[in-house]
C-alpha cells in the first residue's frame, strides 16, 4: 500500500517536471526567435 502510494507520488512529480520542462523549452524557443527578429528590423 505504501509502495503504491510512493509510485503514485513519483509519477505525479515526473508529470510536473515534464510540464515545467516543456514550458521552459517553449519559452526559450520564443525568446530565441525574438532575439533573431530584433536585429532584422
Image (tube, grey):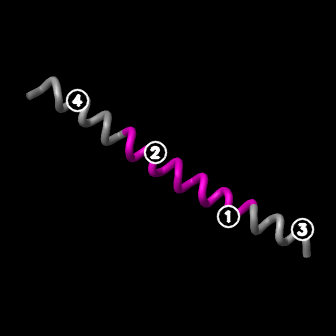
Q: Is residue 35 left or right of residue 9?
A: left
Disc 3: CA contacts within 10 A as few (<14), some (14-19) or many (>=20): few
**Residue shown at the point (38%, 44%) measured from the top left:** 27
Q: Residue furthest left?
A: 41
Assign the N terminus to one quadrant of the image.
bottom right
Label 1 SS: helix
Counting residues from the start of the chain, the first of labels 1 and 2 encountered is: 1
The residue tagged 2 is 24
Q: Quadrant of residue 33?
A: top left
**Residue shown at the point (83%, 65%) measured from the top left:** 6
**Alpha-carbon distance for marks 3 and 4?**
49 Å
Label 2 SS: helix
What range is drawn magenta here?
10-28
Q: Is residue 1 left or right of residue 38?
A: right
**Alpha-carbon distance for marks 1 and 4?**
36 Å
Counting residues from the start of the chain, the first of labels 3 and 2 encountered is: 3
Q: Position of residue 41 (x, y in %)?
A: 8, 28
The residue tagged 3 is 3
The residue tagged 4 is 36
Amino acid at each position: 500500500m505504501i509502495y503504491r502510494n510512493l509510485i503514485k507520488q513519483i509519477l505525479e512529480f515526473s508529470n510536473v517536471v515534464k510540464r515545467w520542462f516543456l514550458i521552459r523549452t517553449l519559452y526559450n524557443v520564443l525568446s530565441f526567435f525574438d532575439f533573431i527578429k530584433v536585429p532584422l528590423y
